[in-house]
Image (spheres, rainbow, N blue to C red):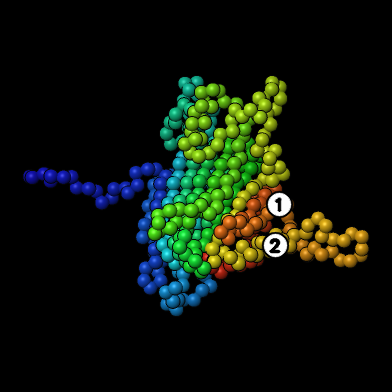
Amino acid sequence: MRQPAMPIRSPFESSIAKPGQGTVVLSLLPPNNPTLTTLTYKYPLKLVPRGPGFVSSPEPSALPNSCPSRPVHLYLLTYGGGLLPGDHIEVSIQLEPRTRMVVTTPQGSTKIFKTEPGSASGINVIKGHRKQMPANQHLADMSQQSLDVRIGRQSALCYLPDPSVPFKNSRYAQVQTFTVDAAAKGDQRSSLCVLDWVTQGRTSRGENWNFRFWRGRNEVWAADAKTGKNRLLLRDSVILDDETEDLDGSDEDLHAEDAGESGLNSHSGRADTPPPQAGLVPLNVIQERTRPHGVVGTLILSGPVFDSLGSYLMHQFNSQPRIGSRNWSSSAPSSAPEPSLSTKGDVTWTAARVRAGFVLVKFGAKDFETAKHWLGGLLREEGSIVREFGEEALFCL
């Protein structure tokens, strides 16, 4: 029997070679049907799409071609409910014009697992890890996650994930990049809602900001299709780093080299950090800087879909009582507003309009439940997310 000149390629061959990598493309098919034309992922990442629930909007047949489509929900999961040491998750999402997507993490929290102490042989034995890792601790146990989203004109992304929970002695870094259409103006602009928050750890086990470091960076870029140039609109970084970690010379050099490649600054070995002294308990730098909060977070809003929400949050923040808002020398009533949801609870927060019309909200709360009740209450009270994306968009809140 004659053999074929070339082997037949298997139709079931994986389209992704790198573990933890996923690609999503949301397109709009005629007349107004949102469809995931591309959906690929590989272990330990899992992407689960589902159709939208009830959204109070006209029937698709009654919508003109200029109106956006119904939202598509995408669940971002990892096996085991978190990231093991050495895991690297890379997710790429493209929203074509007039599409909408809700991205959530329905696992309750994104756990950042810790690393077990090194063995006598010099090889780190990582509990629950899928393979043996290199001997260098800093390179072995660092979990990473990157998200790259391109949002077309009249498209909207609502990204409201559960908070990340770093376990004791864990290391984690994430970079989330969002690219919008630079040529779109007015109501044609892309819309973006991003929530990024982190907790102090497992409070039931006595953890209180005991991880090695947690670093997050959010960037929004405007891409010009004609010139091919990108312009930075917003960059927000959160660095929670245990600067008192004592590394030897060789590990410190590798630490610095790795930080230079990834764009993250290394704080170990700084001259202004005193070395630990014998008999003294090391200072928890992260705990001291975040006190008295058990969760800190950032909310980024941009685009016509979230303009009303941004204005609402700015009004709530500006309506908070300030020092000197009452004339204590007279019996006149205070000019401060009545207590509202934005002033209740042990929450410290600020809101500001920054470059290119973005609304940036920073907050800290004593615990996760307080932050969840506060932020979820504000978003439901304003109502635009529920109207545009459905109640399921607020499942994490």
Q: How crowded is mark 1: few (under 14 residues within 10 Å), some or many (20 or more)?
A: some
Residue 299 percent location from the top left of the image: 60, 55
Residue 328 percent location from the top left of the image: 89, 59
Judged from the image, the secondary structure of the residue bearing numbered disc 2 is helix
Residue lying furthest left in this view? 1
Placement of 17 over or under 312, stated as above or below = above
Residue 29 percent location from the top left of the image: 37, 68
Residue 221 percent location from the top left of the image: 49, 54
Q: Please give the name of the residue rendered at 63% of the width and 36% of the height, measured from the top-left corner.
A: 210
Label drawn at residue 316: 2
Dot 1 amino acid type: Thr
Q: Please give the name of the residue rendered at 75% of the width and 60% of the height, measured from the top-left corner.
A: 320
Instruction: Name the quadrant containing residue 354.
Output: bottom right
Dot 2 amino acid type: Gln
Q: Name the residue under label 1.
A: 348
State the quadrant of the N terminus.
top left
**Number of marks:** 2
Q: Please give the name of the residue rendered at 55% of the width and 49% of the height, measured from the top-left corner.
A: 235
For the residue pair 382 and 185, the one nearer the viewer reads as 185
Marks 1 and 2, how far apart in space? 13 Å
Q: Please give the name of the residue rendered at 40% of the width and 54% of the height, measured from the top-left corner.
A: 228
